[in-house]
Amino acid sequence: MAGLTRTAGAFAVTPHKVSVCILLQIYAPSAQMSLPFPFSSVSQHNRLGLYLLSLTKSCDDIYEPKLEELINQLRDVGEEMDAWLTDHLTNRFSSLASPDDLLNFFNDMRGILGSLDSGVVQDDQIILDPNSNLGMFVRRCILAFNLLSFEGVCHLFSSIEDYCKEAHSSSAQFDASNNDLESLIHYDQMDMEIYAIDKATEELELQKNVNRSVPFHLHTPEAIFKVIEGWRVSPKESSRTSKKITEATLVASASSSTVEDTLVDESLFLRTNLQIQGFLMEQADAIETHGSSSSFSSSSIENFLEQLQNLAPELHRVHFLRYLNKLHSDDYFAALDNLLRYFDYSAGTEGFDLVPPSADCSMYGRYEIALLCLGMMHFRFGHPNLALEVLTEAVRVSQQLSNDTCLAYTLAAMSNLLSEMGIASTSSVLGSSYSPVTSTASSLSVQQRVYILLKESLRRADSLKLRRLVASNHLAMAKFELMHVQRPLLSFGPKASMRHKTCPVSVCKEIRLGAHLISDFSSESSTMAIDGSLSSAWLKDLQKPWGPAVVSQDSGSRKSSTFFQLCDHSVSIPGSVSQLIGASYLLRATSWEFYGSALMARMNTLVYATLFGDHSSSSDGELAYLKLIQHLALYKGHKDAFAALKIAEEKFLTVSKSKILLLKLQLLHERALHCGNLKLAQPMCNELGGLASTAMGVDMELKVEASLREARTLLAAKQYSQAANVAHSLFCTCHKFNLQIEKASVLLLLAEIHKKSGNSVLGLPYALASISFCQSFNLDLLRASATLTLAELWLGLRSNHAKRALDLLHGAFPMILGHGGLELRARAYIFEANCYLSDPSFSVSTDSDTVLDSLRQASDELEALEYHELAAEASYLMAMVYDKLGRVEEREEAAALFKKHIIALENPQDVEQNMA
Amino acid sequence: MVSKESCRNEIRAAIRQLSDRCLYSAAKWAGEQLVGIEQDPSNFTPSNTRFQRGSSSIRRRFSTNESISTPQPSVGFSQAATPLPEEDETIDGDLYLLAKSYFDCREYRRASHVLRDQTSKKSVFLHFYALYLAGEKRKEEEMIELEGPLGKSNAINRELVSLERDLSALRRTGAIDSFGLYLYGVVLKEKGNETLAIASLVESVNSYPWNWSAWSELQSLCTSIETLDRLNLNNHWMKDFFLGYAYQELRMHTESLAKYDYLQGIFSFSNYIQAQTAKAQYSLREFDQVEIMFEELLRNDPYRVEDMDLYSNVLYAKEACAALSYLAHKVFLTDKYRPESCCIIGNYYSLKGQHEKAVMYFRRALKLNKKYLSAWTLMGHEYVEMKNTPAAIDAYRRAVDINPSDYRAWYGLGQAYEMMGMPFYALHYFRKSIFFLPNDSRLWIAMAKCYQTEQLYMLEEAIKCYKRAVNCTDTEGIALNQLAKLHQKLGRNEEAAYYFEKDLERMDAEGLEGPNMFEALVFLATHFKNHKKFEEAEVYCTRLLDYSGPEKEKAKSLLRGIRMAQTGFPSMDLEHFPI
C-alpha cells in the first residue's frame, strides 16, 4: 500500500468514491431491467446519470465532499426519490460491517460492468460500457481496491466508519427537515451550536460550504452544469451572493476548511502529488493577489502550511509557499529562512518541474534559481546592495551551468533593480566582483547599464521563447524609454551627439509588443510546458467554469467583461499573463500622464481597474487607485479626492510599502497650500521627506517629490531665496542622477519662483529652458504650463508685453483647456483677463464680456479647488471690471467674494475648523 | 554533600519501584548509578572492592538481594530532601502480577486491559502506561502502513486523547501520583502542550526525583537557558544530573563539566558520568583525553553501545583505522541494529575512503532512527566527498531542521554552496554556524576564505574574520599568515609586518618550519630594510641564511643591500666575502 500511493497520480479509494460506487450500482444494477426499480421516468434516470458523471469527473479534485454534503446534493437531484436514494446509501454503508463486506462490495461492482467482447447486448439492459467515463471510474476503483494490502483495506474500512459517523449525527435532523431548505439552515446552525463550535467557526463553516461547492465541479461541462444549476443555488449560497466577500475570504476559508479537513480525516488530504502541487500554486497566486491585505489570512495560511508540512514532510514546495507568505507579510527573517530551506531541500527542481529537466541540470541542482529568488527577496525588502551582489552571483552561476533561462530572468531582475533603485554609487557596490555580461560597461551610467541588461535579457528570452519574460521585458523597455532620455549608447566621446530626447513612438511600440503576449497565449495552449516559471495555468484551467456560470449569476456584473469571458471560454489565461497585460495598461496610463493626455491616462487606468483588478497583485491595484485619485484631485477638486482616498485606504492600507500614505500627504499638502495654511503645509512636507530613505540613491522619485514640495512651501511662504536654493540643489541632484524629466519641472519651478519674487528677467531663461526640455521629451502638458509661466513672466517684465504674452497663452490654450487640471485652467483664465486689462489698446467698456467670461470660468473652477489666493485675485479683477462698467450691484457681490477669500486666506485655521 | 550511603539506599528502593512500574530504562539508569557509587570499604572485603568495577554483575546481584531481604533498610535516615514514598500495597494484586508479566512480554494492550478496573496506584499507572505504549506501537506500525506519497503519514497515537482525559481527571481529583504525573507530562508533550507538560513533569520530579525518564523528558522541553532557569526544582542530587545534562544540550560545556565533576565525588565509578564528561570534552575538542576516557569506559563495560559513535568520531578524527575497525567489529557483534553501530561502521568506511558504503550505513542508521542527528551530518560529509552536492545539502538541511543549533551542519551547508561557486550564498550559512559556535577559529577561517574567493574578493571582510579567528586561538596558524598576506596585498606594510612577526613567533614557539617561514622572513627583512631599520632586517636575514635554496641567495643580496645602505657607499669588500 505504501508503495502504491507513493507513485504520482495514484488513484486511491476513499469513502467518497465508495459512495459514488454505491450510487453507480443504483444507476446501473446488474439486473436486466429497462428502468431500474426506484426510477419512475427515464429523465429521472438520466438526471442521476449526469450527476454521477459530474461526480466522477470531479473526483480528482483535492476536496471531497463529506457524506452529509453528498446527501444534500442527492436531495436536489433525486426529487421525489431522494429519500430512497439516501436511505439506500446510508443502509449500504451501515451494512459494511467488516472488511470482508468491502471485498464483496467491490466484487459485486464488477457485475455492473459490461464485458468488452460480449457483443450481444440486449436492448433493455443497462450496462456500463467499460470504456465510458463511468465505466472507467468503476474500473479504476476496482483496480485500486484490488491493489490494496490487507492493512490498506482495514484503513479504508475505518475511514468509512468515520465518514459515516460524521454524517450520522446530522442526518437524523435532515430527515426530519422535510426538504424545507429554509429550515435546513436552521438545523445546520443548531447543529453547530450543539457541537459547541463557536461563532467564528460557524461563519467559516458556512463560507467553506460556499467556496467548496464551487471548485467541486471543476470538470463539469456546461451542459451538465445547467442541469444541476437549479439545486446549486442553495439558500446558503444565495445568502452570500456578494462575490466580494467570497473573494476576500477565499484564501482564509479555503485554508481553514482544509485544516479542518485534515483534522477530521487527514488521509483524505494526502492525495496525488499533482493535486497538491496545483493546490499550492493556487494558494501562491492567492497570496500574491491579496498580499497581506488581512493579517488573518496570512496567519491562517501559515497554520495550514504547517499542518501540511506535518503531513507531508517531503513536499518541499510548502516551504516556498511559506516564503511567499512571509514575504508578503514582511517578515524578513522567516522569509529568508524558508527560502533557503526550500532550495536546500529541493535543489530548485521541485515545483519548477513544469520545465522539462535537462540532463545536465539535474546533477547539479538548480541553485541559480535560489540566487535569483534571494536577490528578488532582498530587493523587495529594500536591500539593493545585497540584492545586486546576489544577482551578480546568480548571473555567474547560471552562466557556469549554462542555464540561459535563468540568466535571462536574472538579467531582467537586475535591470529592474537598477532602474527602480537608481543606485548612485553602483560602481562602489559592485566593486571588482561585477563580472557579468556588462563587465565592459563599468564606466557606463546606471541607466545605460539598465538598457544593456534589458537588451541582453530580451535577446535571450526571445531566443528561448520565454513569452512572459519577453513581454515583461518589452514593458520594462517601454518604461525605460519613457523615463530616460535616449542617448546614443556605447558611442561616447566628443563626436557623439549629446542631444537629449524621448521617443513616444518607441514607447508605444514596446508597449504593443508587450501586449502581444495575450495573443500568443490564446493561439498556443501548450506554452506552459515550455515556459518554465511558477505559473498556475493548469489549475486556472480547472477553475474555469466558476467564472461565467456561477459567479456572473450570483454577483452580477463584476466580471461581465467580454474580454474575459472570451478568454475564459477559449483558453486559459494564467494569472501571470493577465497581470502582465494589466501592467501594460498601467504603463500606458503613466505614459499618457507624461505626454499630457489626462483623458487617455484616465481611460487606461479605468480599463486596468475594471478588467485586471481581480487578477492583479495588490500593489498594482493600489497604483491604479492612486492614479485615479490623483486624477480626481486635479480635475474634480479635493473633496472628491478625499472621499475616494478613504475608500482606497480601507482597501490597501495593509499592503506593504503602501503608497497610500504618500498620496494622502501629497493631497493634504496641496490643499494646505491652496488654502494658504502654511502651518499645516510645512509638517506635511516634512513628513513626506521623512518617508524617503536616508540612504543615497534609494527611492529617488520620493526624494525629488519631497524637495519639490519643500520649495513650493517656501515659495508660498514668500521666502524666495530659500526656495530658490532648494530648487537649485534639487536640480543638481536631478542632474547627478540623470533624471531628465524631473529637471524640466524643476526648471519650471525656478521660473515660478523668480516670477513670484518679481524678478522676471531672471525667470525668463529658466522658463525657456524648461520649455525646450519639455519639447524634446514630448511633455506636452508641462510645456503648456511652462508656456503660461513664460507668458506671465513677459507680462511681469513690462505691461506693454501684453500682446506677446497673450499670443503665447493662446498658443498653449488648447492643451491647457483640453488636458490641464483645474488650477492650471484657472490660472490661464485669470492670466488672460490680466493680459487684456493691462493691454492699453483694450477697452473694458466695449469688450467686457471676454474678460468677464474668463474670470467667471476661473472662479468657478477655483471654488472646487478651494484655492483662495487665486480666487481672491479673480474676484478682485471682476470687481474692478464691474466698477469700470458701473455695475454696482455686481461689483459689490464680487467684492464680497473677494473679502471672503481674503479672510479665508488669512485665517486658514478657521476654515479647517469649518471643514471639520 | 549527600552521603553516599543515603544515595545508595535511595537508589536501591527506587530501582524496585521503577521496575514495579515497568519504567525499565529509568531503572536501568538508576542501576548504573548505584554501582557507580564507591563502596564503603568498611562494609566490604577488600577483594570485593577490587572487583567492583570488573565483576559488577556479581555485586549487583548481591546488593539487590540485600535490598530485597531487608526492604527499605534505611528509610529512617535517607530523608535529605525527599522522602521515599511508601508503597501503597505491600502485597501485589494477582491481576497486577498478571498484567506485569503481560507487559514484560510486550503485550501492552492485554496488560492494560487486565488492569482496567484496578484502583491501586501502581496498577492504575501501569494500566495507563501500557495503554500509552500500545498506542505508540500501533503508531509506529501505521506510520509504515499509511506512508503517504510525500513522506510521512499522519499516524498519531490514538490513545493520547483518552489518556489525556483520564489523567487530567485523575489530577483534578488529586488521585495522581508522581509516576502518573510523568506519564501525563509525556502525553501533554506529545499533544504539543509544552508549558503544561513542563509543569506536570516538574511536579513529578519534585515529588519523586529518582525517575530519570521524567528528567530526560523535562530536558527535551528545555530548549533555552531561560526555560531552564525558570524551572522551580527542589534541591536533590538528581537535579545535578539533570542540570549537567541540560547544560550540555544547551552547549554550556564548562558548566556541565563542573556539574559532572561534583557528581563524580559521589558516583566516582559511574559509567554514565564518565561518558557524559567525555561528550563534553569532545565538544571542547580535547580528543586525546576523550580517547582515554572511552578506552577506560570500554574496559569497564565492554558491551556498551551508547555513546560509542562519539568514540568513533574521535578515532576518525585521529585517523586510527585499526582501532575504529576493532570498535566497529565489537559493536557489530553486540547489536548490529542500533543506529550507533551503523554510524560507527559508516565512519570506518568513510575513513577508508569508501564513501558509497559509508552512505549505506548512515542510511541504515537513519532508518532505525529518523532523528539521528549526527548520521545526517556525517552523511552530508560523505556526499560532499562524493561530489554529490545536492544530496549533501539535503542531508545537512535535515540535520539543521532537527536541531537548528547544529553548527556542523550549517558549516557543511556553507561549504557545499561554496563548492558550487556560490560564495555569497554560502556566507549566510557560515554566519549561522558561527552564531552557534562563535569561539571556533575554523569557522571564522572558513568564512574568511569565502570572502577571499575571486568571485567576491571582499578582502576587508576577510581580514575582519581572520582577526576573529586569531582571537579564538587558531591552532593551525592559518589566520595569522593570511592576515599578513592580505595586508601585504592591500599595501599595508606596517600591519603586514606586525602579523608576519606574530606568525613567526608562533612558528618559533611550535618549532615549525616551512614556506610560510621563509615568506615571513623575506618579507620582514625587506620591510625593515626599506624602513631603514637595518638591525632588525639583519636579524631576519641571518635567520634566512640558515636555510638553503633561493631564499638564501635572496638573504645574501638583501644583506649586501643593507651594508651598502648602512655605509652609504658601495662597499667593495662585501663582494669578496667568502660564500
Image (spheres, rainbow, N blue to C red):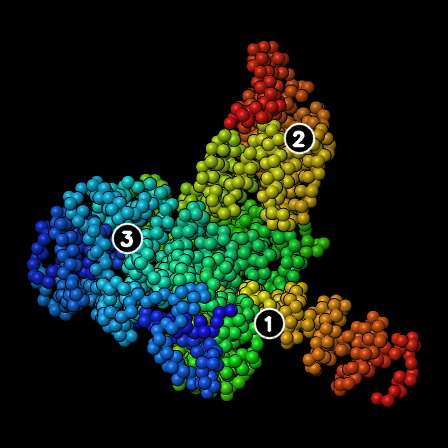
Of all chains, the one bearing label 2 is A
Q: Where is residue A236? Give x, y as percent.
A: 26, 43
Q: Secondary structure at mark 1?
A: helix
Is residue B551 in view from this perspective?
yes
Q: Secondary structure at mark 3?
A: helix
Q: Which residue is mark 3?
A: A216
B436 vs A624, nearest the viewer: B436
Of all chains, the one bearing label 1 is B
Between the C-alphas of marks 2 and 3, the distance is 65 Å
**Residue at left offset 41%, top offset 58%:** B199
Q: Residue furthest bottom?
A: B578
Residue type of the residue flagged with mark 1:
Arg
**Residue at left offset 38%, top offset 82%:** B62
Q: Which residue is mark 1?
A: B442
Dot 1, crowdedness within 10 Å: few (<14), some or many (≥20)? many
Residue type of the residue flagged with mark 3:
Phe
**Residue at left offset 14%, top offset 49%:** A82
Residue type of the residue flagged with mark 2:
Ala
**Residue at left offset 56%, top offset 14%:** A893
